[in-house]
Structures are given as structure tokens and as C-alpha cells.
Image (cartoon, helix red, strand yellow):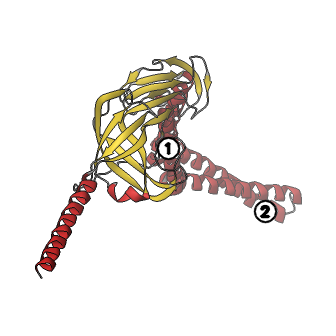
């Protein structure tokens, strides 16, 4: 009986010891750092002019550091300055036409039309009186039929001229029609839009950098004839700096957005960079050939983006890095602040 009790006690102690050991081992596994491998991913921007022309001046070269708003190059702006002057003149002309249409006719012009009306009235009175006299002479057979017909035609012509003079005076007194004023306003708006575009084209003859960074490539030299949108410089942005890495499905649960990451590079074994996971791809893909992992390359993995908090100039585009993820903590959500792609095109 005692032997059975002793055996049961031994078994219980063994079960308790195994349970404790299992819990400790599980905690150690949970707290063990997950090691991943990736590459530095720095965004680049293709810079170019929105207008074409002859490249007049280049202010920077490859390797130069630039700051936001710094002018990098300039296109010959003489044609664009001339276009702006022409557009400004067109605006002034259209504005004068609109002012004239809104103001109507001057009093001197109206007086001149009244004088013309008086002349036409006198001419009609004479022609009409002469026609009536000719009718009396025709009744006495003192004139030929042709003479009577000529008098009638002259009277009708004088009457038409008189009516035209009356209509013209009414037009001058009323002023321009609303449709004519609206047309003048539309013409002014059109010329103003053309002037704004000319001013924008002139401003676009100067190429400025949108962000701080380093000039990677200088593709054109002064004197080159450029087309609009062509790449003149390739700019490597100073910020942000990201790490592109991949994790297999087995360890996917440990790669949570907000997880702190320690970053090491081969050339600086004592240097540590720090960051956080900012993005985990929702879809799986085959491991890229550029990624070194202990698993087979045919394994499906998920892409990660790690945001580097303390990056410096020693982190270069494409540099391989080793990542250590500390698990068993409570990460805070972060925003990766951009699109998934590693490059931008901007002007």
C-alpha cells in the first residue's frame, strides 16, 4: 500500500515538474527574438520639368545633398516670358472691350446719329414731295412713265434710309445687348486663363526639389533640348527610410504592426538601429531571390515594412540587414504613412 502511495506521489511530482518545465519553455519561446532578413528601402523621386525647352543651367551634381525648395536646374525662359507678355496684352484688350460694351455709346456718338437721322428725314421729305408733284404731272400727261417710276423709287429709298437711321439711333440709346456683354465677359475669362497658364509655364522653367535628399543621378547637361516630363535628376529622399523584409506563415503571428525591431548591418556589427513594423502584407507571395532565409525559397512568405526611427546616411538603398523582433509584448499601432511601393515619381 505504501509503495502504491509513493509511486502515485512520484508520478504527481513528475507531472508537476513537467508542467512547470513546459510553461517555462513556452515562455522562453514566446520571448525569444525572431530573426528576419531584409533590405533597406529608400524612396526615390524622378525630377523633371513640366515644360520643354533648352536646359540653360544646372546647379547640383550627383551626390549633392539638397533641401526642400532648392532650385536644381533652369530652362531658358525667354520664350515663356514673351508668351506671358502676349497673354497680358490679350487680357488688357479683352478687358477694354468689356468695359466698352458695358458703358454703351458716348453722347457724342448719339448726337452724330441724331444728325444723320435729321439728314435722312430731310432727304425723305424732299423725295416724297417730288414724287407727289410727279404724280400730278403724270395726271396731265406732262411726264413719261419712267420719270414717275424714278420719283417713286427715290421716295422709297429715302424712306428706307430714314428707317435705318431711326433704328440706329434707338440702338445707340439702348446700348449693347446682354448677349454682347456676356460674350465680352467670356472672352476676358478666356484670356485670363491663358495668362495664368503662361505664368505657370514660366514658373515651371525652374526645377526645385520637393523634399530633402541626395542627388543620385544627373541625367542631362546644360544645352540639352528637353521634352516636358523627361527625367533630369533622380533624388533619394532622406526620410522616410524603410526596411523591406519577409516572414513565413509559421512566424506571421509574431510580426504585428507596432512591434519594435532592432536592425543590424554587416558592415557595422556594433551599430544598432531601431524601428517598428508599420505594414504587414495581407497576401502571401513566393520568397524573392534577393532575400536570404533559412527556409526554402519556394516557401510562401508575407512582406513586411519596418519603419526606421533613427536612420542615418550609412543606411543605403538595397543594403542587406538583419532584423530582430522581440515578441511577447503589447505593440502600439502605427501608420506606415504611404503606399506600399518603394518608389515615387514626382516632378
User: Residue at position x 76%, y 54% from top?
Assistant: 154
User: In the figure, residue 309 lies in which quadrant?
Assistant: top left
Q: Is residue 61 left or right of residue 68?
A: right
Query: Which of disc 2 and disc 1 is earlier in sequence?
Result: 2
| In this view, 142 is above or below 218 | below
**Residue sitting nearer the eye, 223 or 274:** 274
Q: Position of residue 308 (x, y in %)?
A: 32, 39
Q: Position of residue 113 (x, y in %)?
A: 55, 46
Count of numbered circles on the image: 2
- Density class for disc 2 (Cα within 10 Å; few <14, some 14-19, many ≥20) is many
Residue annotated with mark 2: 135
Secondary structure state at the residue bearing disc 2: helix
- Residue found at the very far bottom of the displayed protein: 1
User: In the figure, residue 72 lies in which quadrant?
Assistant: top left
| In this view, 102 is above or below 144 | above
**Residue sitting nearer the eye, 334 or 34:** 34
- Residue found at the very far left of the displayed protein: 2
User: Residue at position x 28%, y 52% from top?
Assistant: 258
User: In the figure, residue 248 lies in which quadrant?
Assistant: bottom left
Q: Can you say which quadrant of the picture contains the N terminus?
A: bottom left
Residue annotated with mark 1: 188
Q: Is residue 110 left or right of residue 133?
A: left
**Residue sitting nearer the eye, 309 or 238:** 309
Q: Is residue 251 left or right of residue 193?
A: left
Q: Position of residue 123 (x, y in %)?
A: 66, 50
Amino acid at each position: 500500500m505504501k509503495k502504491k502511495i509513493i509511486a502515485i506521489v512520484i508520478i504527481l511530482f513528475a507531472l508537476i515538474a513537467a508542467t512547470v518545465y513546459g510553461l517555462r519553455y513556452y515562455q522562453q519561446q514566446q520571448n525569444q527574438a525572431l530573426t528576419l532578413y531584409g533590405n533597406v528601402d529608400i524612396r526615390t523621386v524622378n525630377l523633371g520639368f513640366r515644360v520643354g525647352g533648352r536646359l540653360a543651367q544646372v546647379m547640383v551634381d550627383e551626390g549633392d545633398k539638397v533641401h526642400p525648395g532648392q532650385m536644381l536646374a533652369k530652362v531658358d525662359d525667354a520664350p515663356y516670358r514673351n508668351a506671358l507678355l502676349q497673354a497680358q496684352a490679350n487680357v488688357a484688350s479683352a478687358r477694354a472691350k468689356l468695359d466698352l460694351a458695358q458703358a454703351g455709346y458716348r453722347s457724342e456718338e448719339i448726337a452724330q446719329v441724331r444728325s444723320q437721322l435729321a439728314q435722312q428725314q430731310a432727304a425723305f421729305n424732299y423725295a416724297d414731295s417730288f414724287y407727289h408733284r410727279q404724280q400730278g404731272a403724270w395726271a396731265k400727261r406732262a411726264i413719261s412713265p419712267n420719270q414717275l417710276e424714278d420719283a417713286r423709287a427715290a421716295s422709297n429709298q429715302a424712306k428706307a434710309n430714314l428707317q435705318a437711321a431711326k433704328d440706329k439711333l434707338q440702338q445707340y440709346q439702348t446700348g449693347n445687348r446682354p448677349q454682347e456683354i456676356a460674350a465680352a465677359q467670356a472672352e476676358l475669362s478666356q484670356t485670363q486663363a491663358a495668362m495664368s497658364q503662361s505664368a505657370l509655364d514660366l514658373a515651371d522653367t525652374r526645377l526645385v526639389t520637393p523634399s530633402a535628399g541626395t542627388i543620385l543621378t544627373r541625367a542631362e547637361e546644360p544645352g540639352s533640348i528637353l521634352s516636358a516630363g523627361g527625367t533630369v535628376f533622380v533624388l533619394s529622399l532622406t526620410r522616410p527610410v524603410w526596411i523591406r523584409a519577409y516572414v513565413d506563415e509559421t512566424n506571421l503571428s509574431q510580426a504585428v504592426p507596432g512591434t519594435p525591431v532592432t536592425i543590424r548591418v554587416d558592415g557595422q556589427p556594433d551599430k544598432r538601429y531601431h524601428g517598428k513594423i508599420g505594414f504587414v502584407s495581407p497576401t502571401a507571395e513566393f520568397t524573392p531571390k534577393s532575400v536570404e532565409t533559412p527556409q526554402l525559397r519556394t516557401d510562401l512568405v508575407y512582406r513586411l515594412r519596418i519603419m526606421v526611427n533613427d536612420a542615418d546616411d550609412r543606411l543605403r538603398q538595397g543594403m542587406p540587414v538583419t532584423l530582430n523582433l522581440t515578441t511577447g509584448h503589447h505593440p502600439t499601432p502605427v501608420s506606415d504613412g504611404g503606399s506600399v511601393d518603394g518608389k515615387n515619381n514626382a516632378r
